[in-house]
Image (cartoon, grey):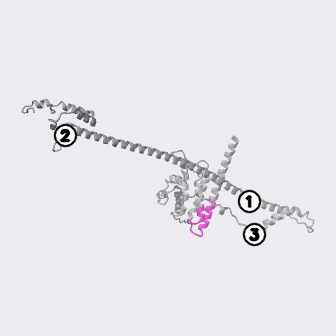
């Protein structure tokens, strides 16, 4: 088990080294094609050589770039612009702030692509890359081990980009090339194709035919002419040329197989990331649904409490009105004021009236009635009969 893990680690290290070497080699080829193309016409967004170079540079700056940890513990993808924005912030008279404040560029990847174009037009792309690589602490914080910007290839990259300062670029920062929705795709076709003349093809076929038929010519009975003799050096040279061509074809085949393997690894990583994103979307939808249900429940409770509060308010208002209307000591006079003198000389309280007042008012109201009954304002029938100036009927 330990040997298996060790072999996997060695294979991963070897694959990372091959990937770094291939990207740097292809970048060197793309810079050369850009310089050759600039001798005949101006380089703009429509030039396929520039589009390929921009994709290669984006792949190099995104090689083994760390993700950004979120509050939920997930690692969200990050663009190389986040690294360039921090590492090149101290460059004098830089375009970082201008690109950060662009209105038509919103995504981080689009800002990184705009930075590549502006830096090329300013003829300062190599300067930006050199300044970013010098900030080793920031570079180490943004990239994992085995990244191109952390290896020896980074110095080669800055030197290669220095030759682009001789080219006059002209870009439109509002074109489709700044769209950050599609990934950077490298076209390896211009660097893999080779031309071969018909004369060399015929000579190769003749050499192979000669090598294949050399062993059977001596045993052929129809061969009645003089034997076909060649010296040993010529045979050795022919075999050497064939072997070199075979090795070249074998190396190209291995390179293409390595590219296919890398694409398969990238595809599997993309599928894994897609599954993680789908799971994250499901978890987010579930959390939103639970939060919505909780908020709806809280709203219903608040509405019930509000209704109860209004109902209690109406009941207290009705109770206060009933106390005022049935309180004998708060009768109104002609001017709308309470007059307690009218109660003097009124009729005697009967048990039915007291019971009615007790049923409509509170116990305190009933107590007020009984207290008024014994006060001086309420006169009993006996006092009315014995008052001076009145005679019984």
Q: Main secondary structure of the magenta part?
A: helix
Label 3 vs label 1: CA separation? 18 Å
User: According to the image, label 1 marks what residue?
Assistant: 249
Q: Residue furthest left?
A: 389
Q: Measuring 62% from the left and 64% from the top, which residue is drawn there? A: 33
Magenta segment: 27-52
The residue nearer to you, when weighing 107 against 204, is: 107
**Does residue 223 appear to the left or right of 43 in the view shown?**
right
Is residue 222 shown above or below 362? below
The percent coordinates of residue 35 (x first, y second) are 60, 65
Quick one: label 3 or label 1, which is nearer the N terminus? 3
How crowded pointer 2 is (Cα within 10 Å; few <14, some 14-19, many 20+) is rated as some
From the viewer's perspective, is 341 left or right of 17?
A: left
On the image, the x and y values in percent for residue 305 come to: 38, 42
Q: Earlier in the sequence, mark 2 or mark 3?
A: 3
Classed neighbour count for the residue bearing mark 3: other residues with Cα under 10 Å, few (<14), some (14–19), many (≥20): few
Q: Earlier in the sequence, mark 2 or mark 1?
A: 1
The residue that disc 2 covers is 331
Mark in the foreground, 2 or 1: 2
Check disc 3 and report its element: helix, strand or loop: helix
| Residue 160: quadrant of the picture | bottom right
- The residue nearer to you, when weighing 14 against 68, is 68
> Disc 3 designates what residue?
198
Q: CA distance from mark 2 to mark 1?
A: 119 Å
Q: Residue at x 76, y 69 (%)?
A: 199
Circles 3, 1 touching at the beta carbon (< 8 Å) = no
- Toward which corner of the image does residue 351 lie, by quadrant? top left
């Amino acid at each position: 088990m330990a040997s298996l893990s060790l072999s996997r680690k060695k294979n991963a290290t070897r694959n990372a080294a091959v990937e770094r070497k291939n990207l740097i080699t292809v970048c060197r080829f793309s810079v050369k094609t850009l310089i050759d193309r600039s001798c005949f016409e101006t380089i703009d967004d429509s030039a396929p050589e520039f589009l390929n170079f921009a994709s290669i540079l984006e792949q190099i700056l995104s090689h083994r770039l760390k993700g950004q940890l979120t509050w939920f513990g997930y690692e969200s993808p990050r663009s190389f612009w986040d690294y360039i924005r921090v590492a090149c912030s101290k460059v004098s008279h830089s375009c970082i702030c201008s690109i950060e404040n662009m209105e038509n560029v919103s995504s981080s990847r689009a800002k990184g692509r705009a930075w590549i174009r502006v830096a090329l037009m300013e003829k300062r792309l190599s300067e930006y890359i050199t300044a970013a690589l010098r900030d080793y602490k920031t570079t180490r914080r943004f990239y994992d081990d085995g990244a191109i910007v952390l290896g020896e290839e980074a110095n080669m990259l800055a030197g290669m980009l220095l030759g682009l300062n001789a080219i006059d670029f002209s870009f439109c920062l509002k074109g489709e090339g700044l769209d950050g929705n599609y990934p950077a795709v490298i076209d390896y076709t211009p660097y893999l194709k080779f031309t071969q003349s018909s004369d060399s093809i015929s000579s190769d076929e003749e050499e192979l035919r000669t090598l294949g038929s050399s062993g059977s010519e001596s045993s052929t009975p129809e061969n009645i002419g003089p034997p076909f003799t060649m010296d040993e050096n010529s045979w050795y040279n022919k075999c050497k040329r064939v072997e070199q061509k075979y090795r070249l074809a074998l190396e190209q085949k291995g390179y293409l197989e390595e590219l296919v393997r890398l694409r398969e690894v990238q595809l599997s990583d993309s599928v894994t990331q897609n599954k993680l994103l789908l799971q994250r979307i499901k978890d987010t939808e579930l959390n939103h649904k639970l939060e919505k249900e909780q908020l709806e429940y809280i709203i219903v409770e608040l509405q019930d409490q509000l209704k109860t509060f209004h109902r209690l308010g109406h009941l207290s208002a009705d109770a206060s009105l009933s106390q005022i209307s049935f309180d004998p000591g708060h009768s109104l006079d002609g001017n709308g004021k309470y007059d307690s003198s009218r109660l003097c000389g009124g009729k005697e309280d009967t048990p039915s009236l007291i019971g009615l007042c007790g049923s409509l008012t509170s116990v305190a109201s009933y107590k007020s009635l009984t207290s008024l009954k014994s006060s001086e304002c309420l006169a009993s029938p006996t006092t009315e009969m014995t008052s001076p100036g009145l005679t019984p009927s």
